[in-house]
């Protein structure tokens, strides 16, 4: 864990520590409370980092796949293997969003990443893939449906904003 992460966790835990002392918890109870909260916060921080990283990886992977699919070498055996590997990685990155969302008991994603998800959806529309796993295919479908719904809602809100002026 980096020093910045430790400082952030300590800053966030200070109010809980003060509350614990005011409630006259024993030192052991206070330490247990702080340890539990630190663990939860670290998990949220780690999950958020994974989630943000997946968004970046989706953008890069889709760009590389589009280049490979439209290149003259797309029929080369090694290029085919590389594309298959990237397709599997893309599925993994997309599933990260549903896993993160389910863990947080929330179905909302950061709207800045919706663009990446929609680019992946458009890519998969242009270049469909038969996923060998129904579970993964379902999760990817859920991500795409959500991203499409958010984009549609944002377009409608944007159109409303234009007509009100």
Image (cartoon, grey):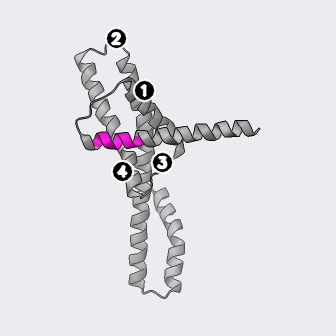
Secondary structure beneath label 1:
helix
Q: Which residues fall within the magenta stretch?
A: 136-143
The quarter of the image holding the N terminus is bottom left
How far apart marks 4 and 1 lie (CA) works out to 24 Å
Q: Is residue 54 magenta?
A: no
Numbered tag placed on residue 99 in the rendering: 4
How many C-alpha atoms fall within 10 Å of the one at disc 2: few (<14), some, or many (≥20)?
few
- As measured in the structure, the alpha-carbon distance from the residue carrying label 3 to the one carrying label 1 is 21 Å
Of marks 3 and 4, which one's residue comes earlier in the chain? 4
Inter-mark Cα distance, 2 to 4: 37 Å
Q: Are marks 3 and 2 in contact (CB under 8 Å)?
A: no
Separation of disc 3 and disc 2 at Cα?
37 Å
Of the pair 150 and 51, the residue shown nearer to us: 150
Where residue 145 appears, as percent x and y from the top left, is 43, 40
User: What x and y, as percent, mark residue 152?
Assistant: 54, 38
Which quadrant, please, contains the C terminus?
Answer: top right
- Seen at 41% across and 35% down, the residue is 58
Which is closer to the viewer, label 2 or label 4?
4
- Residue placed under numbered mark 3 in the picture: 109
In reply to whether residue 140 is colored magenta, the answer given is yes
**Disc 1 versus disc 2: distance between alpha carbons?**
16 Å
């Amino acid at each position: 864990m980096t020093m910045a992460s430790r400082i952030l966790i300590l800053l966030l835990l200070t109010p809980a520590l003060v509350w614990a002392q005011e409630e006259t918890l024993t030192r052991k109870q206070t330490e247990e409370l702080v340890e539990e909260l630190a663990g939860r916060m670290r998990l949220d921080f780690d999950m958020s980092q994974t989630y943000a990283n997946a968004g970046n990886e989706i953008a890069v992977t889709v760009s590389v796949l589009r280049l490979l699919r439209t290149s003259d070498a797309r029929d080369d055996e090694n290029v085919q293997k590389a594309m298959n590997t990237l397709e599997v990685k893309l599925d993994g990155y997309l599933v990260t969003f549903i896993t993160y969302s389910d863990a947080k008991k929330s179905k909302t994603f950061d709207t800045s990443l919706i663009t990446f998800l929609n680019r992946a959806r458009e890519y998969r529309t242009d270049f469909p893939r038969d996923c060998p796993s129904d579970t993964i295919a379902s999760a990817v479908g859920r991500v795409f449906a959500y991203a499409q719904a958010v984009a549609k809602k944002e377009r409608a809100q944007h159109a409303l904003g234009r007509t009100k002026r």
